[in-house]
Image (cartoon, rainbow, N blue to C red):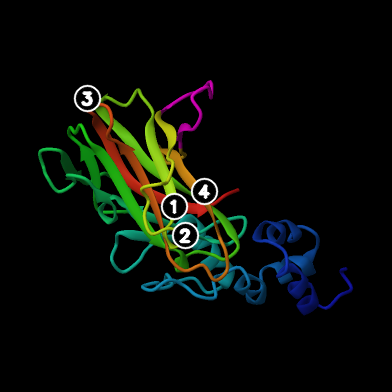
Amino acid sequence: MNNLPEDCIAMILSLTTPLDVCRSSAVSRIFRSAADSDDVWNHFLPADFPAGFAAPAGLPTRKQLFFSLVDNPLLLNDTHLSFSLERRSGNKCYMMAARALSIVWGHDPRYWHWISLPNTRFGEVAELIMVWWLEITGKINTTLLSDDTLYAAYLVFKWNHSPYGFRQPVEASLVFLADTESTDDVQPSMISLMQDPSGDDGQSAELRRDGWYEVELGQFFKRRGDMGEIEMSLKETKRPFEKKGLILYGIEIRPMP
């Protein structure tokens, strides 16, 4: 293989994955040179960046741009949506800020407060003061996503100093709206916003590296040519007791491992 021209090696590497390319750079000097070439990394960058995307300054190579988008999600124009790339595949990832979601009573300060926290990508997160009826919904257009990719949506959150009312499971659902005119017939799954080390309660919250929790709302396969919206929701509307202490960061949509 070392006898092949560098541009031929680069073409072969471009047909693999970002992870494979990084591993191949240890093979030899010519592989390392090919693995750093813009021709290779152009294949892992999206052909169609989302509206409002502006490449960060000071990144002279396509490899640097790729890893910048992996490690440093970019806010798009409205600042309520961030864009990044998945490290292993280069597929598109998004996070919708709490402000981009529909939160029942979210604009009533008796029930929700909008606060700023350090080390978050959005200007505000939503803190639940108290509700009996909890309902959070988000929608994203499938045209923003990478084709032929299995995605999952995650609610990202943490707790304040006095959470209450979340010991019981809550309802989660995810539906492709092009497949149905109404979500009334969708059967939700039951998930727990609390951690369950035993795994006995089914889908439960997990602690992320950034110190927030996440819990999966559902999965969907984005096919080439799909047109419509994905609606993701979390509800607890059937038990007449108060709930408080949730701090909502947003909903993240990213490829499954």
Residue 104 in the image: x percent, y percent? 21, 45
Discs 2/1, front: 2
**Magenta region, residue range:** 194-207
User: Which residue is label 1 attached to?
Assistant: 175
Front residue of 138/58: it is 138
User: Can residue 170 be seen by looking at this rendering?
Assistant: yes
Q: Give the crowd class for mark 1: few <14, some 14-19, many >=20 residues within 10 Å.
A: many
Q: Earlier in the sequence, mark 4 or mark 2?
A: 2
Front residue of 67/183: it is 183
Q: Earlier in the sequence, mark 1 or mark 4?
A: 1
**Label 4 amino acid?**
Gln
Quadrant in the picture for the N terminus: bottom right
Q: Secondary structure at mark 2?
A: helix
Q: Earlier in the sequence, mark 3 or mark 2?
A: 2
**Label 2 amino acid?**
Asp
User: Which residue is label 2 attached to?
Assistant: 179
Horizontal arrangement in the rendering, residue 210 relative to residue 249 (left or right): right
Q: Across the whole image, how many numbered discs are drawn on residues?
A: 4
Query: Which residue lies at the image location 30% right of the left edge and 59% below the top edge?
Result: 80
Tell me whether circle 2 and circle 1 mark residues in contact (CB < 8 Å).
yes
Disc assigned to residue 241 = 3
Discs 4/2, front: 2
